[in-house]
Image: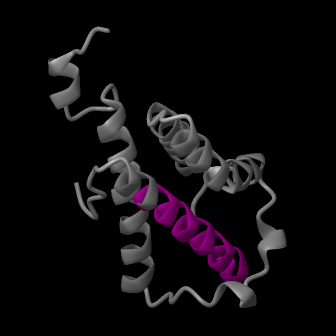
Amino acid sequence: MEFDLDLATRKSQENPVYYVQYGHARLCAIQRKAAEGGIERGPVDAVDSSLLQEPEELDLLKTMSTFPVVIESAALELAPHKVIFYLIELASQFHSYYNRHKVITDNRALTQARLCLAESLRIVLRNGLDIIGLTAPEKM
């Protein structure tokens, strides 16, 4: 096994840990921006999640839904790399989504649905990073 120390310490998208941590920080920034704009994320049960119709949104929801299975499989097989690969995939999907779609929009209901999606993503990334012993920074 080769370990690239230079890559592991690099603060760029080439470093998978940095890439996942940056995703978490970006999600925190979205929530801060909403709060600064006077937009309070409502309770999940009051959100119209049917508004999440973009293919990328559906992919994110599907990937997040597999988190418990990935964790269980990684634990049973003593394979922490499964969690890391999962987090990299989820972060990649999120960054792609973020580059194509605004979370905070003029449509209040859509913004609420997307803020809930963003908060769900943040929680999954934070929990995944915590499970493998890494920090989940709120700013980078």
Residue at horizontal 52 percent and vertical 70 percent from the top: 119
Residue at horizontal 24 percent and vertical 15 percent from the top: 3
Q: Where is residue 59 in the image (x, y as percent from the top left)?
A: 73, 46
Tell me, yes or no, if residue 100 can be seen here: no
**What segment carries the magenta color?**
104-126
20 up-or-down from 46: above or below: above
Residue at horizontal 55 percent and vertical 34 percent from the top: 77
Q: Which of 134 and 92 is in front in this view?
A: 134
Q: Which of 63 and 131 is in front in this view?
A: 131
Count of marks placed on residues: 0
Q: Position of residue 12 (x, y in %)?
A: 26, 32
Question: Would residue 43 be found to the left or right of residue 84 on screen?
Answer: right
Q: Where is residue 84 in the image (x, y as percent from the top left)?
A: 45, 37
Q: In terms of image quadrants, where is residue 35?
A: bottom left
Q: In terms of image quadrants, where is residue 110?
A: bottom right
24 up-or-down from 99: above or below: below
Question: Would residue 26 be found to the left or right of residue 140 on screen?
Answer: right
Q: Which of 87 and 46 is in front in this view?
A: 87
Tell me, yes or no, if residue 42 can be seen here: yes
Q: In terms of image quadrants, where is residue 2?
A: top left
Q: Residue at the top extreme? A: 2
Residue 132 on the magenta span: no
Task: Say which quadrant the C terminus sits in.
Answer: bottom left
22 up-or-down from 26: above or below: above
Q: How is the image coloured?
A: one colour
Task: Say which quadrant the N terminus sits in.
Answer: top left
Q: Magenta stretch mostly in which secondary structure?
A: helix
Q: Where is residue 93 in the image (x, y as percent from the top left)?
A: 58, 42
